[in-house]
Image (cartoon, rainbow, N blue to C red):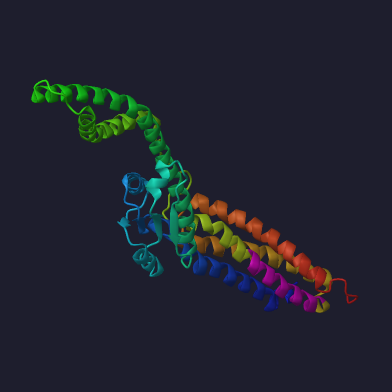
Amino acid sequence: MSKWFSNKFSWLGMLVASFIAVSFVFCILPAFKHMPTNTQNLPIVIVNQDNQQISDKVADGLKDNLPFKHISTSSSLSRTKHRIELRKASLAVVIPDGFNKDVRAGKRPTVNFVVNNANSMVQTNVNQGLISRIQSTVNAQLTQQSLVGMYAKQLAPKMMKTAMAAGMKTAMQKAMTASKGQAVNQKQIQKQVQAKVQPKIQKQVMARATKMAAPFNITAKSSTDTMGTKQVNMQHQMAPMFISMGQYLGLMIASIIITMTFMSVRFIAGKWKTFLGLQVTGVITAVVLALLTVGALRCLVSFDGGVFNALLWQNVLYDFAAFELTSGLALLFGGLLSRAV
């Protein structure tokens, strides 16, 4: 076995595997630092092309309910598209002309979105999630407006009839007094009373209808209880994937190198002694590789000694299992069944 351990190629695989695994930690994992913390700073633009009562309420509701710091409004879709093209805005919510008319007519209104997918993966995913949230918010607000409209239709005739009766009584008394008993034009008086009463009644109807629909406009408060890591970056979440990937790739290449060494040294030191040396090298490689990888990870992600020990032994077992799998396949396809002894 001394000939196996004195052969420099027996340890070349461990060096290659260590370099690859540590490279995955130091070269890839830092790219996932502080990514989610800036999503709330994405600039959102609300383009209101309708500028009517309902569309204005929808635009105001979006500004109050979206969890972003930079929400602006605009009436120019072309300028907004130019801002998105230059990446000065992340997403635009467009309330098109005729939105208020469609809602009043009972038709399904349209809300358009403008996004630029030539951005980072995180920003694109945030935009997609934001579109779903905006649609839910708009639907909730339209449901509220529909309830207000329904109650307004029920209240308007009764309130208008009562107001017209009171207004006509007062107007007829004044007209009869002014005419000193002569005939008066009742239809003309009715038109004058209606023109005077109708705007006031409309305001009163909308106020009462909004008050009646208010109990159905219930929104729940939300809170998030964060368990596990409370770090502000994604390195904790991405670390298991990248350290496992780096170690497996390194061990796969190391197994090929060690198998090639085994195929040549076995003629000098003997097949079984060389195979035993290969296994011992695998165990040493698993321990060293796990120690280097978890040590490198601790340089980027903070955790205590207990977590370090747990991760170390978990990765030792993982590395040994990966080595046995890859070296077994390499031996199987590398000429183990050769007639040479």
Report the residue at 35% width, 56% height from top. 47
Relative to 102, is 79 on the left or the right? left
Figure quadrant of residue 153: top left
Figure quadrant of residue 45: bottom left
Report the residue at 47% width, 68% height from top. 118
Q: Is residue 186 magenta?
A: no
Stretch of the chain drawn in magenta: 248-266
- x, y percentage for residue 74? 31, 58
- From the viewer's side, name the closer residue of 136 and 186: 186
Image quarter of the N terminus: bottom right
- From the viewer's side, name the closer residue of 175 and 272: 175
Q: Is residue 260 magenta?
A: yes
Report the residue at 74% width, 67% height from top. 327
Residue 132 seen in the figure: yes
Question: Does 220 sit above or below residue 337?
Answer: above
Residue 288 seen in the figure: no
- x, y percentage for residue 79? 34, 66
Relative to 294, is 184 on the left or the right? left
Question: Does 93 sit above or below residue 165?
Answer: below
Image quarter of the C terminus: bottom right
Question: Does 57 sit above or below residue 24?
Answer: above
Question: Does 67 sit above or below residue 290?
Answer: above
- From the viewer's side, name the closer residue of 152 and 23: 152
- From the viewer's side, name the closer residue of 287 and 17: 17
- x, y percentage for residue 230? 43, 49
Figure quadrant of residue 281: bottom right
Kindly report the secondary structure that dominates the magenta region of the rendered protein.
helix
Relative to 99, is 29 on the left or the right? right
- x, y percentage for residue 171? 16, 25
